Image (spheres, rainbow, N blue to C red):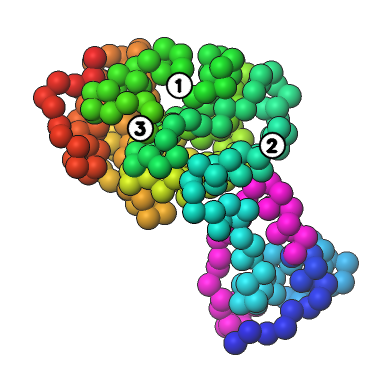
Amino acid sequence: MPRSLDPQVRRALTERIRFYNELGIYDFYRRPANDSPAEVAPEPQPEQREEMPLRSKAAVVVVEEDLFAVPKPEAAVPDPAKALRIIREDLGDCTRCRLHKQGRKQIVFGVGNPRAELMFIGEAPGADEDQQGEPFVGRAGQLLNNMIKAMGLQREDVYIANIIKCRPPGNRTPERDECDTCSPFLMRQIAAIQPKAIVALGAVAAKTLLAINAPMAEFRGHWYDFRGTKLAVTYHPAFLLRDPRQKKETWKDLQMVMRELGLPVPAKGVE
Ligand code: URA
C-alpha cells in the first residue's frame, strides 16, 4: 500500500534522482519492497538523514510513489533518428568522466541506420575514430566492414557504437567507472534503435553489457537476452588483426546472427 514519505527524505531522493538524470541515467534497479520488520533499516538520526535515504526503507516506499519514473527526454519520440539526436544533445560536450581532459579530440557517438536490425558494439574509439568522430574507421574498422559485407549487408544498414564514447589515453582499456558513466547513453541509443540483434565485439563490450566476467570462449556461441534484445558475442576485429586464424570462428558467430535475422548464409566467410 502506498505510504506517505518523510518530506526530507523525499526532497533528498528527488535531488539524487535529478543528479542521475543529469548524468543521463534514467533506469534504476529496484529492490522489491519487503515489509518484514527485520529488513527495515533503523530510523536515521537527523544528522545522518541526507546521507542515508537510498539505503533506508523509505527508498522502497518511494518506488510505490514512482518518484523514479522520470521519462527520458526521447521517451515519447517514435522516430529513432530524432530520438538519437535528442540523446546526442543530452550528452552535450560531455565532461562526466576524466576522459574529457585526457586528450580526447571529440566524442564518438555512433553511426549508422537509426532503424537498424543489427547493432555492433565495440570497446572505445581509437586514434582514427577520435580524429574522425566515427566508430570503427581505422584498420579494425576496415575488418568490421568486411565482416558486415560477408553477412550480405552494408555498413549503412547497421548501427555501430562503443561502450564508451571518448578515446582513452594510449588506447588503454576503459576503466570500470568510465564504462559505468558512459554506458547509460549507449543503453538509450539501443532503446531508441530497438535492433533485433546486438553483436558485442570483444570481451570489454561483452563483460560490460552482460555484467558477467567470463573468458571469450564462454561468451561465444550462445544468445543472451539483453533487456529483451538478442545479444551475441564475437571476437573484436582488432584481435582478429593480431590473430587472423580466429576469423573462421568469427564467421560461425556471424552465421548464427544471420540465421536469427533471416539473412541467407553464404559459404564464404570473413576475408
Ligand atoms: N575499437 C573499438 O572498440 N572501437 C572503435 O571504434 C575502434 C576500434
Q: Nearer the viewer, mark 1 or mark 2?
A: 2
Dot 1 alpha-carbon crowd within 10 angstroms: few under 14, some 14 to 19, many 20 or more = many
Q: Does the residue tagged 1 have its C-beta within 8 Å of any atom of ligand 1?
A: yes
Q: Quadrant of the C terminus?
A: top left
Direction from residue 218 to residue 211 in the image, left or right? right
Residue segment shown in magenta: 14-40
Q: What number is the disc on residue 136?
A: 1
Task: Name the quadrant containing residue 234.
Answer: top left
Q: Residue at x 28, y 28 (%)?
A: 153
Nearer to the camera, 34 or 95:
95
Q: Earlier in the sequence, mark 1 or mark 3?
A: 1
- In the image, is residue 56 above or below residue 163? below
Residue 208's spot in the image, x, y percent? 48, 40
C-beta proximity under 8 Å, tags 3 and 2: no
Cα–Cα span, label 1 and label 2 = 21 Å
Q: Are marks 1 and 2 in contact (CB under 8 Å)?
A: no
Provide the secondary structure element on which disc 3 rests: helix
Q: Residues within 10 Å of mark 2 (few under 14, many from 20)?
A: few
**Which residue position holds label 2?**
92
Quadrant in the picture for the N terminus: bottom right
- What percent of the width, then of the height, locates residue 117? 34, 42
